[in-house]
Amino acid sequence: MAVSLSDKKAIVEAVSEVAASAHSAVAAEYRGMSVAEMTELRIKARESGVYLRVVRNTLARRAVAGTDFECMSDGLVGPLVLAFSQDEPGASARVVGDFAKKNEKLVVKLVSFGGKLLAPSELEMLAKMPTREEALSKLVGVMQAPISKFVRTMAEPTSKFVRTVSAYKDKLQAS
């Protein structure tokens, strides 16, 4: 199917706009996947806030030029689907990685995070990054730990005194 020059420019502009604001990207070869499988992958990506698109490699190279994902340009070969994480850095890695575990036809070729090209084997590391809510809850826990330890330390002499008096009272009642 021939794509007009204006359509190509629109595709490059759309993908470039997404790439400019994305946190991470994953490119995976989808050779041999059925339409139903690809639709399932798209649904999971949409639910996770991941922009998923099949783009011609020449257009993809132009789209990632000047972004943090320019390092992927040389590896854009073959039928690839691009997944960009919009909200969380690990979202695209989780979606593609989980789907690749169930479907061996989806093969991860490129992983990029922070302007660096990672090995496809590092996809799992990126996927294990905490979500925003998890990271915030861990931060609150770390910030709260010294305060709660201080409160427990300050309350300990009083509670120890109460336990001592209670034990002495029990001893007097027993005798």
Image: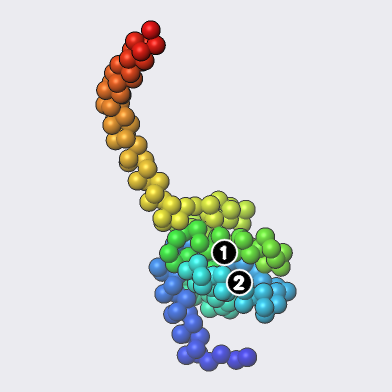
Give the CA distance from mark 1 to mark 2.
8 Å
Q: Is residue 30 above or below residue 6?
A: above
Lower sequence index among marks 1 and 2: 2
Q: Find out whether the residues at labels 1 and 2 contact each other: C-beta distance under 8 Å.
A: yes
- Mark 1 is surrounded, within 10 Å at the Cα level, by few (under 14), some (14 to 19) or many (20 or more) other residues, namely many
- Mark 2 is surrounded, within 10 Å at the Cα level, by few (under 14), some (14 to 19) or many (20 or more) other residues, namely some
Q: Nearer the viewer, residue 53 or 69?
A: 53
Q: How many marks?
A: 2
Q: Residue at x 34, y 10 (%)?
A: 172
Kindly state the secondary structure of the residue where label 2 is placed.
helix
Rendered location of residue 108, percent (x, y) = 63, 62
Q: Nearer the viewer, residue 38 or 162?
A: 162
Kindly state the secondary structure of the residue where label 1 is placed.
helix
- Residue 75 appears in the rendering: no
Q: Residue at x 28, y 27 (%)?
A: 155
Q: Nearer the viewer, residue 33 or 108?
A: 33
Report whether 105 appears left or right of 42. Answer: right
Quarter of the figure with residue 104: bottom right
Numbered label attached to residue 95: 1
Quarter of the figure with residue 102: bottom right
Amino acid identity at mark 1: Val
Q: Is residue 172 above or below residue 99?
A: above
Residue designated by label 2: 41
Q: Residue at x 56, y 70 (%)?
A: 44
